[in-house]
Image (cartoon, rainbow, N blue to C red):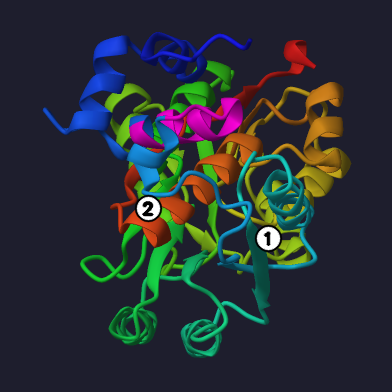
Amino acid sequence: MAKRQGLADLAAAAGVSLATVDRALNGREAVSATTRALILEAARRVGHPALVRLTGQVSRGSGPELRLGVMLHKQGQDFYKAFAETLNRTLTQIPGLRARLVLEFSGSQSPSDMANLMRAMAGRCDVLAATAVNHPEVTAAVEELRAEGVRVVALLSEFAPGARAGYLGLDNLKIGRVAGWVTTLSARAPGKVLLFVGGHRWHGHELREAGFRAYLREAAPHLQMLETVVNLETRHLTYETTLAALRRHDDLRGIYVAGGGMEGAIAALRVSRRPGEVAMVVPALTPDSRAGLADGFVTLVTDTPLDRLCRALFTGMAAMVESRAEFGQIFLPPDIHLPEGL
């Protein structure tokens, strides 16, 4: 006869204390959304009987299929290709999760396009997670969805504050400071630093820029920030702008790409400088950035842990639908990649 699983078994599976599990089950004290998601995912994974107290359902195997909506952008970028693949793979790996992924890509970064795609998801999903710009049109779309019973979670970059139901991603302000710290350590002499953001409406990019600039002001007065460049997360524009900056400024010491388009910066650096001459920080581990690390043209990659993100996302979304749980604000630690760590 199989041994009956106790709360200690669930605590061990979730990697938390027994007292934390007890609080989550009995509501004696507040438990963060991140911790609750860990406990819920562990209960599903091991088939623990506490699942019924956490969700109100013993199993979703015979229950209605959940419709979990995800809206991304930049379908052709390596990062978002990997994101989509991880979403589809993770959905099949969470025990007891009976759900269908409704995945759509926005055709542009236009607030109107993003807002209209969000509206089009109404009736197609029970809850929606999205990457989107922070703009009144997007906020209006989120409010309309909420009125129809569809709550929206912001992915990677915050938007619709006060209307959205939660946030899942990195702590972008800290990520910017980390980029500033590495740039300061790696810059070999006084000089200039170039920063790219995808657009001024990406709240996550604004936070990364703020953290980056703040660190350089505090710790690197010998490094001069050039005017921030909006690259619309495109490879070609980033390539041409980086190449022009390298030709104009012999003393360019650092490049930080806070969003997409890093492939263009890496390519421009390859044809203009020797490895290690310019510190470069980029936000995702892709074939281009991995090769850049190996060849000495990329100094640091602050990558989003897609496996952990997708698991936390689906677990939290399911809890939102099943038990009306709050998603909350979940900051994941980044995956840090350095040349010697490859």
Secondary structure beneath label 1: helix
Circle 1: residue type: Thr
37 inside magenta stretch: yes
Q: Nearer the viewer, residue 214 or 95?
A: 95
Q: Position of 148 compared to 240: left or right?
A: left
Start-end of magenta stretch: 36-49
Image location (x, y in percent) of residue 242: 69, 53
Q: For label 1, count other residues whose C-alpha is less than 10 Å away and answer few (under 14), some (14-19) or many (20+).
A: some
Circle 2: residue type: Tyr
Q: Nearer the viewer, residue 306 or 50?
A: 50
Q: Nearer the viewer, mark 2 or mark 1?
A: 2
To which residue does mark 2 refer? 167
How far, Cα to Cα, is label 2 from label 1? 32 Å
At a point 55% along the width and 21% down the height, the residue shown is 189
Q: Is residue 223 visible?
A: no
Q: Position of 75 compared to 279: left or right?
A: right
Q: Nearer the viewer, residue 129 or 207?
A: 129
Most distant residue in the front direction? 1
